[in-house]
Image (spheres, rainbow, N blue to C red):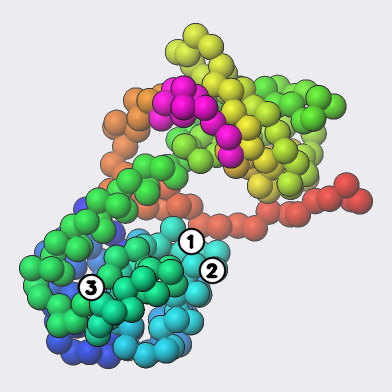
Amino acid sequence: MHARVLLSTRDSALHRIMERAVSESGAELEVSSQSTETQLALRRKRFDLLVLDCDGDEEVDVLMATRQGCLNPHCLVLAVTSSLSDLQTTYDRGANFVLDKPVSMENAARTMQGALECILRERRKYFRHPVKDFAHLSFSNLLDLRVQLRDLSESGAAIQSSIPLYPGWEVKMKLELEELTEPIALSGFVAWAHRNGKAGIKFMVLSERARNQLTQWLAGRAMDVDLSNDFDRVFPPLTPPIKISPKD
């Protein structure tokens, strides 16, 4: 599977082990030896996995930068520690996986395989499938709209509305998808909006039935898409929308 991995370490032994594990997994590796260099890379490029050597306090800043940054919010973090006594603290700081030093080739390879499986699941969750169907929106029973769907994922949808919407608006939504005999009903909010009527809806409340319907519908259309290689289609470059408000 093609994945992008950033390794942050000054430990030559860990460097050799992880370089081999990443290479055998088929992933692409970039290496940084300074925390400032790592943070800069996280601000400028997209990564699937950060392998972070947690020998110093500076790594806490790197973890925070990863979780709070806008470019790599879905990046998984593999923390490598000198002692498993800080295991819970490391997870609390944002790590998804933890390895204890010294790291063996066997453990590194097994952890990389687990990380890649999680990465593929994450891509499937956020995969933006282009659609040309419609949806019905209602806002607190004050406004009803039929809008064009532009793309759809398990977590949200991009739409084209005939009028501008406003970030933060709560919305009830019915997806009128091809081949479904009834709409999928859910709730969410307007996450972003442009003046030209383009907007993003973040899904928040789905019944188990609605979630299963949506997941199955998307899975049926993603079968021919290689999510393991299509990184930029799943996580396209972020272009901040114009934040409009009622005062505009």
Q: Check residue 14 for magenta coloring.
A: no
Labels 3, 2: front one: 3
Stretch in magenta: 204-215
Tag 1 residue: 73
Q: Identity of the amino acid at label 2?
A: Gly
The residues bearing labels 3 and 2 have C-alpha atoms spaced at a distance of 24 Å
Give the quarter of the image for residue 113. Answer: bottom left
Q: Give the vertical position of 90 relative to 49 (above or below).
A: below
SS for tag 3? Answer: strand
Q: Give the vertical position of 139 relative to 69 (above or below).
A: above
Residue 226 x/y as whole percent: 28, 41
* Residue at 25 percent of width and 82 percent of height: 83
Q: Are marks 2 and 1 in contact (CB under 8 Å)?
A: yes
SS for tag 1? Answer: loop
Q: Check residue 213 for magenta coloring.
A: yes
Labels 1, 3: front one: 3
Q: Give the vertical position of 6 relative to 132 (above or below).
A: below
Question: Hey, which residue is sitting farthest front in the picture?
Answer: 85
Badge 2: how crowded within 10 Å, few (<14), some, or many (20+)? some
Tag 2 residue: 69
* Residue at 51 percent of width and 41 percent of height: 155
Residue 59 x/y as whole percent: 41, 83
Tag 3 residue: 99
The mark tally for this picture is: 3
